[in-house]
Image (spheres, helix red, strand yellow):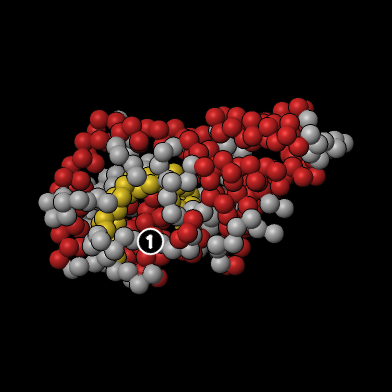
Amino acid sequence: MALFGFFSKEKKESLDKGLEKSKDSFFSKMGKAIAGKSTVDDEVLDELEGILATSDVGVDTIIKIIDRIEARVARDKYLSTSELDKILREEIAGLLAENDDNSATARANDFYVPEQHKPYVILVVGVNGVGKTTTIGKLAYQFKKQGKSVLLGAADTFRAAAVDQIKLWGERVGVPVVSHGMNTDPASVAFDAAKQGQESKVDVVIIDTAGRLHNKVNLMNELTKIKRVVQKFIPEAPHEVLLVLDGSTGQNAFLQAKEFTRATEVTALAITKLDGTAKGGVVIGISDQFNIPVKYIGVGEKMDDLQVFNKMEFVDSLFGK
């Protein structure tokens, strides 16, 4: 039985399927670790610590989780190994709930756009290969499903085929794309996207950016320039800077998050490709460690497989039998 019931049946099934590799890997290792054991003791906790590490939960978060389970063992005196998945689920959910400073849980099925901003401008950043442009296309699709009008800006002008890729997504979803072609000035694309978005009174403008971590100074300068030209039309924009991370890279996703958050002001995270990896625990670590909300997760190839991240449903799918 699920701990929390906010998701639709279809979305919960999609989440369960997307996390299948991570879940199967975890329970396979856990089954071997507790074979022959009847209670949760120091040896079991040591094994659990190692298993969480191989799931890329992250050292600092693992320490918190083990401390919580140790406290519970001390309090309850006796905990059987057959209860371990339930205990783990409850303690991780409790840990993440303590860090929950937004109302995303209450809007678990909703790709929400604040009504006071029109257009609502999202600047999307991330290194090449993380699924950045695909995430933009899926976001556009979800916003359109919500009845919102969407405009895309193809400002990743230096990567081969990036402009063509976002144009294809525009055609697929049925939303307009502002593009100047390859090797053009990204800021000029952003300028025209903001101008057209405001003049057309669209609800959401999503601007793709160059996916290169060439160095922090250049990255910061490029993004600062894009922000400056967008603000000529929409002074408070961008309203959101969304960093896309590849969940299948595990600890590399942590490192990319650190690099980008040092270089620019990131306000939200999207973690992709969770269906192709056994490293789904990285979402727990990132959600716990960064003072930036994980807003979206990608759990499959279909357009509906980009989901608003709900911490409790995620933990329930990953650790619930």
* Residue 221 on image: x %, y %: 21, 36
Closest to the observer: 116 or 287?
116
Q: Given the current orientation, which residue lies at the most extreme left position?
A: 232
Position of residue 135 measured from the top left corner of the image (x, y, whole percent): 41, 55
Say above or below: 49 vs 105: above
Residue neighbourhood size for the residue with mark 1, other residues' Cα within 10 Å, grouped as few (<14), some (14–19), many (≥20): few
**Where in the figure is residue 3, as x and y percent of width and height?**
64, 55
Query: Which residue was labeled with disc 1?
Result: 112
In the image, residue 170 sits, relative to residue 245, either above or below, namely: below
Q: Name the one closer to the observer, 193 or 71.
A: 71
Residue at the (15%, 66%) spot, across then down: 199
Q: Secondary structure at mark 1?
A: loop
Left or right: where does residue 192 sit relative to residue 239?
left
What residue sits 17% from the left and 55% below the top?
234
Residue 282 in view here? no
Q: From the viewer's perspective, tell me whether residue 21 is left or right of residue 116.
A: right
> Mark 1: which amino acid?
Tyr
Q: Position of residue 167 (x, y in %)?
A: 31, 61
Q: Quadrant of the N terminus?
A: bottom right
Q: Residue at x 38, y 70 (%)?
A: 146
Residue 111 showing in the rendered view: yes
Q: Nearer the viewer, residue 61 or 160?
A: 61
* Residue shown at the point (77%, 45%) measured from the top left: 83
Foreground residue among 53 and 186: 53
The answer to whether residue 314 is above or below residue 260 is: below
